[in-house]
Image (spheres, rainbow, N blue to C red):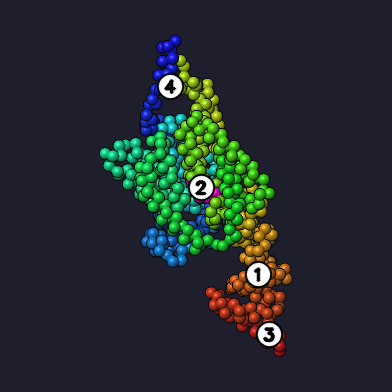
Amino acid sequence: MGSRKKSRKTKKTKKKQPLRMINPSPVSLSKLMLVVLTIFISVFTVYWNTLGNEFVSFDDRKYIYENDLITGGSGLTAIWTDLWNKHPKTHYYPMTFTTFWLENQLAGLEPSSFDKDKVIGHAAHPIFHVNQMLLHTVNSILIFLTLIRLGAGFWPSAFTALIFALHPVNVESVSWISERKNLMSAMFFWLSLLCYIKYRQRNTKTDSPKLYIISILLFLFALLSKSATMVLPPIIIITDRLLDRHWTWSSVKRSIPFFILSILMIYVTISREAFIAKSWEPLAIWIRPFISVAAIVHYVVKIFLPVNQALIYPRWAETLAEPRYLISLAAALTAFWLIWKFRKQLGDLWLWGLALFLITIFPIIGLKNFVWLQFAFVSDHYIYLGSAGIILMAGLLLYRWCLKEPEDGKDVLQLDPRRFAAAGCLTLLLLIGCGFRTVAQNRTWKNNLTLYSHILTVNPNCFIASDSLGNHYSQKKDYSTALTYYQKAAAIKPTFIKIKYKCGRMLMLLKRPEEAFPWFKEAVHMANSRNIRSWRLHTYYADCLYSLGRLDEAIKEYHYILNMKPPNAANIEKAIKNINKIKSKHDQ
């Protein structure tokens, strides 16, 4: 009895073994190449149908075919020196714009021919979409290599990379050419993190800091592709916690250069957005936490159930009467409680995946006002970086389910063959399902018509979609259909001046000036009440008055327009002369 008590006492007082740094999981070259080849084939298979897709008006116009930095004659100098432009037209993304400029040159598109009339209605050159696929392939491979380095193991790493490669939530980032910035920044993000991990897994005291310096440079490239990657510094600290198994001040010191670069890019981004963003009503501070929680829940749901996806989701009501907010809050609190309760069983890497997801989406969940919030509170392309974290969490749980408890005398978990086979079948079904959903979602990005029509099926009250479809049919000279969509847009957003005179313009083209007059009159009244001077609006209004035979009022409007010094001054003066001729004939 005495010896038993002594042995128990010994077990209780036995010191714990020091926790070691995670080492890279050994993976054979054949396995590595198999995953790389599978990712490459999978991505090109599901995204092949994007090759015939056109540019779309949403952001492709601003970033590519109407961007003077891309189509102008100043070349790369203008792109990289745009940081000092006092009147910028878009964000400062020189790495991304450099790729567009190079594609423009390689595709043989001269600046003079790269205009809206020749771009709209024609398939984008294949080089744009092929590069999108290549970048997405590289990102998927980098995720696989990073997770292997972190000790996730071959199967969870391969699961995460393959699901990420085929997941339909990433369609927005791959099919939408403007989201090249997402793909470029993610590539440099993962390269920077991978180099940092490799640096940390060496002897940082004796080895050369070359990998550390390369990691910082790659992070700079990520920021110059898209500023959303500014979230890497806290992820660096979280990664150090995973590697060292405890928090250290050394980690904070190593992250200082990353934080400095992030702060500088945040300043540039805020300055740009303040200049180029159109004004809108900011969100009330009290509702922002509820929107943020609802956004997080929305993104998790979309990753596990990617249906009813659209570029612009319905914008939730800014009131607690919206049931989504309280339901999301209850779900988030329950999830937090379960994670806290089982945190030790879940493991550090699982929690690292959760941190990756939450940190990467933190800037865009609605706590701070930014441009997209005027359209919707969520968008699929915002989780391109973070979705890998949620997929990793699912992969680790699935792999843990495949393991059986060790037999007597063993301390290593072993794979249960039956469970592993079942998990393999489930994974295959998930990959096939994701592939089919991605192919289907790609079709919605074929052109303006398919994109905005699909948005309206998911979000019938989307102003932008209705207005854009009106623009589409107007360019096709189908003025009657265009009028229908413009009127729908006006009903959704009655305070928008431009949509008012678009309705009037279509009615004028349909030879219905009597119906057009009230639209123009209301638009002019709204513009005057807001001290907005628009020569185009007043020109349309004057033309309408002229068509109705209200010549004195038309002349008054034309003279008012000339005081604005419009670009069409010659046409206005010609119109005034014509009216004076008509009046003189009438007087005779």
Which element type, helix, strand or loop, lies under badge 2? helix
- Alpha carbon separation for disc pair 3 and 4: 109 Å
Residue drawn 43% across the image and 43% down it: 235
Residue drawn 54% across the image and 51% down it: 367
**Would you name the residue on which mark 1 appears?**
526
Asked whether residue 24 is in view, the answer is no
Question: Callout 1, which amino acid?
Answer: Met
**Would you name the residue on which mark 2 appears?**
362
- Alpha carbon separation for disc pair 1 and 4: 80 Å
> How would you classify the magenta stretch by its main secondary structure?
helix
In front: label 2 or label 3: 2
Above/below status of 153 relative to 389: above
Q: Which mark is residue 446?
A: none
Q: Position of residue 265 (x, y in %)?
A: 42, 55
- Alpha carbon separation for disc pair 4 and 2: 43 Å
Whether the residues at callouts 1 and 3 have beta carbons within 8 Å, the answer is no
Q: Which mark is residue 12?
A: 4
- Could you tell me which quadrant the N terminus lies in? top left
In front: label 1 or label 2: 2
Splitting the image into 4 quarters, where does residue 100 fall?
bottom left
* Region in magenta: 360-365
**Would you name the residue on which mark 3 appears?**
583
Splitting the image into 4 quarters, where does residue 70 fall?
bottom left
Whether the residues at callouts 1 and 2 have beta carbons within 8 Å, the answer is no
- Alpha carbon separation for disc pair 2 and 3: 66 Å
